[in-house]
Amino acid sequence: MNAAIDNVYAVILAAGASSRMGSPKQLLIWQDRPLLAHALANAQVVLAERIVVVLGANVEAIKTAIDLNGISVALNLDWADGMAGSIRTGIEALPATAGAVLLMLCDQPLINAAHLQNLLLAWQHAPERIVVSQYAESFGVPAVFPAAFFAQLAGLTGDRGAKPLLMQFEETLLKVPLQEAELDIDTQGDYQRLHAHKSDAADDRGTA
């Protein structure tokens, strides 16, 4: 069974204050553009303009730095309460016709459009299942949630994001290997590791 991709929407979570980073990580530069712009561009490749960006802290700075024309922006006024509120805000902003949501973070810079496409293809072949990224000894987002799980996503609380829901349904998850999802940018050390990865990749190309 192949489910239609044209009723899938992306929700990009970008509302946090980046307290451990010390500056808005949404605006950290990677490959000559802010991290949020990078995530947005990848989502647009696979889902065109069917995208909701959830903002909260530093909203004016982000809107000034990133072109969000044509993109639905949902404001999480309770961003300080944790990621669950941002997920709820994003889910509530989806149209009633949405058949699934691709849940993304703005701070997983090694993920590209091809990775997102692989997740969506897996969901198309099993549209009743949650499709997650598998990395290291764990799994998580980016992930595709069918509409049947929207109410549970909207009912999450606290700062653990979707992980409690994923753990609840672990036996039926469809896991797609995506090692690149392991690196998310929370601290200056993470950002330095990202740039070290870029240097390593350049070295590999030089010796190929």
Image: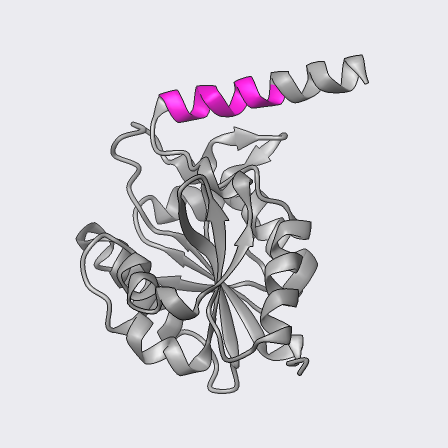
Which of 78/152 is in front?
152
Residue 69 magenta-drawn?
no
Q: Is residue 76 visible in the rendered structure shown here? A: no
How is the rendered protein coloured? one colour
Residue drawn at (50%, 80%) of the image: 128
Q: Is residue 45 visible in the rendered structure shown here? A: yes
Residue drawn at (48%, 60%) of the image: 143
Residue drawn at (57%, 74%) of the image: 8
From the viewer's perspective, tell me whether residue 90 is left or right of residue 100. Answer: left
Q: Residue furthest front?
A: 171
Q: Quadrant of the C terminus?
A: top right
Which of 59/46 is in front?
46
Q: Quadrant of the N terminus?
A: bottom right
> Which quadrant of the structure image shows residue 48?
bottom right
Magenta segment range? 189-198
* Rendering coords of residue 10 (x, y %): 52, 64
> Which quadrant of the structure image shows residue 171?
bottom left
Q: Main secondary structure of the magenta part?
A: helix
Q: Residue furthest bottom?
A: 96
Q: Residue furthest right?
A: 208
Which of 186/175 is in front?
175
State how many labels appear.
Answer: 0
From the viewer's perspective, tell me whether residue 180 is left or right of residue 57. Answer: right
* Rendering coords of residue 57 (x, y %): 30, 47
Residue 192 magenta-drawn?
yes
Residue 188's place in the image compared with 108, above or below, is: above
* Rendering coords of residue 65 (x, y %): 51, 41
From the viewer's perspective, tell me whether residue 112 is left or right of residue 100. Answer: right
Which of 8/140 is in front?
140
> Which quadrant of the structure image shows residue 127?
bottom right
* Rendering coords of residue 4 (x, y %): 66, 80
